[in-house]
Amino acid sequence: MTTERPGWDPGSWDAYVRAHPRATYLQTTAWARVKRSTGWSATNVGLEGEAGDRFGAQLLTRPIPLLPWRFAYAPRGPLADEWNETTNGTWIEALRAAARPGGRLARTAIVRMDPEIEDAEPIRRALAGSGWRPAHDMQPRRTRIVDLAADEDALWSELRKKWRQYVNKARSNGIVVRDVDPAAETNAFDTFHAVMREVSKRTALPLRSAAAFREVWEAFAPSGESRLLFAEAAGGEVQAVLLLVRCGDRVVEPYGGMTEAGAESRANYLLKWDAIRTSKEQGATSYDMWGLIGTGIDHFKAGFGGREVAYIGAWDLALSAVGALSFRSAEQGRRLYRAARRRLRGENLALPAAPGSDA
């Protein structure tokens, strides 16, 4: 028998997330604080079985513009000890119970989830058969993960021969990688943003503000779970950057890029290798390169070894038939508008659009 858990307090919830095999920073209360500034609220829906097994998700919710409903999203959730037919059924029951008048999801039209469950046709059929519907992805559906259990020599040997040569070339070019403390270097995120602006111009991917990047770093800095890495030339020019976030034993690299000079000096190769190497040194057991989108970026990441992983993607559950229909119509309209705007701006439409949000 599984019963609803009446909500974790922030400390116990974060402890549960960090201890989970699929620990993800997107399910932490720190991430909920980041998203609060953009209009999201957070609530937990969790369950616990007689054997002590438990699962649940932190859901981010926000009003649907001009409509009397809310949209709820469980980024990389729910977290479950095991995902099976029973788990799915109980999860649906918990969501519907929370959507009743007075519940934590009252007046919610639709719930979206994108758990880190590897893609498989039987799982897709089971989800579709139980009322879930494929949805627009808000997180990368494919990624590459490096297992850090091996020693450093083994990790180094996993790099393609050419990639090892590029790492060494960057060193011979005088490139140095260092951890940056934005609390001491107050212009650090202006520098980070300048590099990311070049990336955005080159790839047509969305560009966040310097303040948005800083906010992510600040949310995880008190627990020592965020790192800012710069690859610099001998003269101090920053040629490549990475913002890393750790949760439990896992490190991810949600934001990063290089300048044209960094591509020439191979600074990005040294930076990536150093991020992997030092993450292992600091006790992490896996390194998630966070997203493959079908471009040259995929080829670059593949050269560092690891395993490509494809998840089931985003799925929606309607809690209000009318509200869900209204939300889907509005979402489709927004996508059509964004596509038209990309055409008007002359962006390269051969590049896939980025996920709609990293909420």
Image (spheres, rainbow, N blue to C red):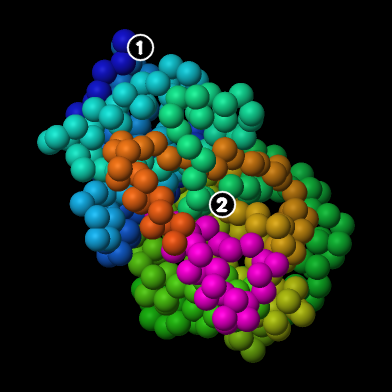
For residue 190, side relative to residue 39 (left or right):
right
Q: Where is residue 196 in the image (x, y as percent from the top left)?
A: 55, 76
Mark closer to the observer (2, 1): 2
Callout 2 secondary element = loop
Q: Distance between the residues labelled 2 and 1?
A: 34 Å
Q: Is residue 5 above or below residue 253?
A: above
Q: Can residue 186 be seen in this view?
A: yes
Tell whether position 280 is magenta: no
Residue 87 rendering spot, x and y as whole percentages: 42, 21
Q: Which of marks 2 and 1 is nearer the N terminus?
A: 1
Q: Which residue lies furthest to the right in this view?
A: 161
Which quadrant of the rendered structure holds the N terminus?
Answer: top left
Taking the spot 75% from the left edge, 49% from the top edge, the residue there is 305
Label 1: element kind: loop
The residue that disc 2 covers is 140
Q: Mark 1 points at which residue?
A: 51
Name the foreground residue: 160 vs 298: 298
